[in-house]
């Protein structure tokens, strides 16, 4: 792949809302890890990293304005096979994005500051519910894909059509594994909001979880 092709794909990637979100999410969690690493030895640098983390987090909330409508639309189009799981997953995501607006407004001073913690808790709770059901659906589909692949490979013949179908199944599995990795990582971050604890709230745990989610998102949204 030439440098020109990569640049073209980067431009397309960053033109998407999800693309710019993953870039800024990378900034947010790299700066979180930088703040943790420099906090004791270089407080000045740590302060700048913290400012970068805060600005990135607030920017991402602004970019997500209106994303709750995606959940409403997904509820309307929930597939029949996984209707219950899809409704629960998208309802959780819709709650997450809707209350995240109020978290953002309270943190930038438009609403009272005391609302931030409450809105963040409700948002994180809805987010967690959504992730659990999204992970469940992806794991079911991964298991189904493995069975399909084994069945295809057990057949003799098939030629190029068989190879094409196996390749399609494998690509779908990779994408679903990436989605599952991102959702598990984001679930850890959400739990840190809902039920603070030494493991989930540690800067390294949050930093690594955020980067896993961001980079899985890069992979899934990168133009083919």
Image (spheres, rainbow, N blue to C red):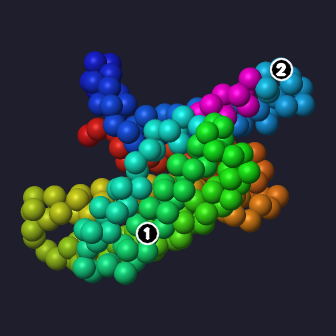
Q: State which tag comes first along the sequence, 1 or 2.
A: 2
Q: Is residue 29 visible?
A: no
* Quadrant of the snapshot with the N terminus: top left
The residue lying at 22 percent from left, 63 percent from top is 166
In magenta segment, residue 173: no
Residue 167: image quadrant is bottom left
On screen, 85 above or below 9?
A: below
Q: Quadrant of residue 128?
A: bottom right
Image quadrant where one finds the C terminus = top left
Residue stretch rendered in magenta on the structure: 48-57
Would residue 23 be found to the left or right of residue 143 on screen? right
Residue at the image point whose x is 45% and y is 44% from the top: 64
Q: Considering only vertical position in the picture, is 56 above or below 167? A: above
Tag 1 secondary structure = helix
Residue at mark 1: 91
Measured from the top left, where is residue 59 in percent x and y? Answer: 54, 34
Query: Is residue 49 positioned above or below 138 on the image?
Result: above
Residue situated in front as seen by the camera: 97 or 141: 97
User: Residue 44 has which mark?
Assistant: 2
Q: Position of residue 174 (x, y in %)?
A: 37, 57
**Residue 221 at x, y percent in the picture:** 35, 43
Q: Nearer the viewer, mark 1 or mark 2?
A: 1
Q: Closest to the observer: 107 or 18?
A: 107
- Residue at 18 percent across and 63 percent down: it is 165
Residue shown at the point (13%, 74%) measured from the top left: 156
């Amino acid at each position: 792949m030439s440098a020109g092709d990569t640049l073209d794909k980067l431009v397309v990637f960053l033109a998407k809302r999800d693309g710019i979100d993953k870039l800024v999410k990378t900034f947010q969690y790299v700066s979180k890890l930088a703040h943790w690493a420099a906090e004791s030895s270089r407080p000045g640098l740590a302060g700048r990293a913290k400012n970068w983390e805060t600005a990135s987090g607030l920017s991402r909330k602004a970019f997500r304005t209106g994303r709750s409508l995606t959940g409403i639309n997904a509820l309307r189009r929930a597939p029949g096979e996984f209707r219950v799981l899809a409704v629960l997953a998208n309802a959780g995501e819709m709650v997450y994005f809707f209350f995240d607006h109020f978290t953002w407004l309270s943190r930038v001073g438009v609403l009272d500051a005391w609302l931030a913690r409450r809105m963040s808790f409700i948002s994180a709770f809805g987010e967690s519910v959504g992730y659990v059901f999204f992970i469940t659906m992806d794991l079911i589909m991964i298991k189904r894909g493995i069975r399909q692949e084994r069945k295809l490979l057990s057949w003799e013949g098939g030629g190029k059509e068989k190879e094409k179908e196996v390749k399609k199944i494998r690509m779908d599995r990779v994408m679903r594994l990436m989605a599952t990795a991102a959702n598990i990582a984001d679930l850890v971050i959400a739990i840190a909001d809902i039920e603070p604890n030494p493991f989930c709230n540690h800067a390294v745990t949050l930093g690594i979880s955020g980067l896993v989610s961001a980079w899985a998102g890069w992979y899934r949204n990168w133009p083919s």
